[in-house]
Image: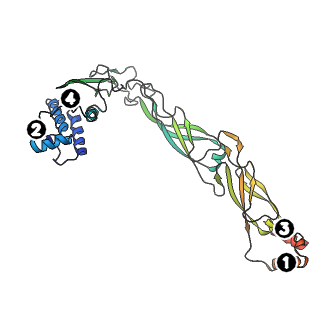
């Protein structure tokens, strides 16, 4: 008898993963349903017996010390105490198929795969929504064969290997009885049909890759991470199955002046110290365009002024909107003109002479300076 290590093509110090990989490769190569060469079935049995021993640490230790004589006739028999290993053998041989009836046939219609499309949109588009055109590559049902994969005027035929059942069965005799192993037919991949005259338009696949234009509706109030589902625009189904869906994941560009926080928008505005003292009406940028903002007299640094209902529309209810919160920054000049210095000194003298009770009083000359300095 050949050495078990030589049968699997591994060294005597091979680890369990190496053994398993070698076993799976050789088992598929010599499986009787795939390899019709003379002697393939016998080689398949020998490979199975070698892995059954070397894949079990206790049996491997006895084999390494005493050879086959140390196995006590157990070589080649499935270890019924380890059904996990037995199930793994079925998976290796038949791509996941277990005992009869343990795996569903893949003969009926199958839904197509869902697709993902990442879309970057502008800040304003996310606020108010927009209809946008995109191009997606996806699989569509072949219009020549209508998804059959066969040349027009022909059709798929029953697989000669499995007789249209989509599965093949193999009986194996063991000292514990006879086991029936069921797997997908290797000729038709479990479909039960084969295409003898394939469609030239799709190469017998029944689907073809196309680049399709779609117009999608982006609702008002979306944000980065929002996912839009477009039903039926994924890959086409197989054997008449429905198409999958398209999922559009949104990313919103940042705005140079406006920041979003939930349904509210935040921004800053710079005013002069004169505007803060006297008050003023200025124009600020909002998502609705330029809007007038009233700066109350006596406004302090970092005061937050609110424009109500100028924020983000609520997703699904665009009538409800957040607010636009504006933080006021006051510019204090680092240099004064001679005229400004004279006027401010007069104001300071005026305050000193009249006392705190007259702080609200402004001379006409000083008021003119304020008005001229407002930007």
Of badges 4 and 2, the one in the foreground is: 2
In the picture provided, is 329 more to the left or to the right than 48?
Answer: right
Which quadrant is the N terminus positioned in?
A: top left
Q: Quick one: 238 or 317, which is closer to the camera?
A: 317
Q: How far, Cα to Cα, is label 2 from label 1?
A: 111 Å
Q: Classify mark 2: helix, strand or loop.
A: helix
Of badges 2 and 1, the one in the foreground is: 2
Instruction: Give the label on residue 25, or none.
Output: none
Instruction: Give the label on residue 68, or none.
Output: 2
In the picture provided, is 69 more to the left or to the right than 348?
Answer: left
Of badges 1 and 3, the one in the foreground is: 1
Query: Residue at (74%, 47%) from the top-left corner?
Result: 309
Residue 163 visible in rendering:
yes
Sequence-earlier tag: 4 or 2? 4
Q: How far, Cα to Cα, is label 4 from label 3?
A: 98 Å
- How many other residues sit within 10 Å of disc 1, few (<14), some (14-19) or many (≥20)? few
Of badges 4 and 3, the one in the foreground is: 4
In the picture provided, is 284 more to the left or to the right than 1?
Answer: right
Q: Classify mark 3: helix, strand or loop.
A: helix
Q: Coloring scheme of the render? A: rainbow
Q: Position of residue 73 (x, y in %)?
A: 12, 33
Instruction: Give the label on residue 348, or none.
Output: 1
Q: How far, Cα to Cα, is label 3 from label 2?
A: 107 Å
For mark 4, what is the residue? Answer: 32
Q: How far, Cα to Cα, is label 4 from label 2?
A: 26 Å
Number of marks drawn:
4
Sequence-earlier tag: 4 or 3? 4
Q: Position of residue 180 (x, y in %)?
A: 24, 23
Of badges 1 and 4, the one in the foreground is: 1
């Amino acid at each position: 008898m050949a050495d078990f290590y030589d049968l699997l093509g591994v060294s005597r110090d091979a680890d369990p993963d190496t053994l398993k990989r070698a076993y799976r490769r050789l088992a598929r190569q010599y499986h009787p349903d795939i390899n019709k060469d003379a002697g393939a079935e016998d080689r398949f049995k020998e490979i199975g017996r070698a892995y059954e021993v070397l894949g079990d640490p206790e049996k491997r230790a006895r084999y390494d010390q005493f050879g086959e004589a140390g196995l006590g006739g157990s070589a080649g028999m499935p270890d019924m105490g380890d059904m996990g290993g037995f199930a793994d053998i079925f998976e290796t041989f038949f791509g996941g198929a277990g005992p009869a009836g343990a795996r569903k046939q893949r003969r009926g219609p199958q839904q197509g795969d869902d697709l993902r499309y990442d879309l970057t949109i502008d800040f304003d588009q996310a606020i108010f929504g927009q209809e946008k055109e995109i191009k997606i590559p996806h699989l569509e049902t072949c219009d020549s064969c209508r998804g059959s994969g066969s040349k027009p005027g022909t059709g798929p035929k029953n697989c000669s290997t499995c007789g249209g059942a989509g599965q093949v069965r193999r009986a194996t005799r063991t000292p514990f009885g006879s086991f029936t192993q069921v797997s997908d037919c290797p000729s038709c991949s479990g479909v039960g049909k084969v295409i003898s005259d394939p469609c030239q338009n799709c190469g017998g696949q029944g689907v073809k890759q196309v680049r399709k234009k779609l117009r999608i509706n982006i609702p008002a109030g979306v944000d980065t991470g929002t996912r839009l589902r477009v039903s039926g625009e994924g890959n086409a189904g197989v054997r008449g199955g429905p198409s999958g869906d398209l999922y559009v994941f949104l990313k919103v560009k940042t705005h140079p002046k406006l920041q979003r926080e939930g349904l509210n928008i935040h921004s800053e505005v710079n005013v002069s110290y004169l505007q803060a003292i006297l008050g003023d009406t200025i124009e600020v940028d909002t998502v609705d365009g330029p809007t007038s903002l009233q700066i109350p007299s006596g406004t302090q640094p970092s005061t937050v002024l609110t424009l109500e209902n100028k924020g983000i529309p609520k997703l699904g209810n665009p009538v409800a909107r957040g607010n636009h919160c504006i933080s006021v920054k006051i510019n204090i000049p680092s240099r004064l003109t001679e005229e400004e210095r004279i006027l401010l000194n007069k104001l300071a003298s005026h305050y000193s002479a009249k006392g705190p009770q007259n702080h609200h009083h402004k001379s006409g000359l000083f008021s003119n300076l304020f008005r001229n300095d407002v930007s």
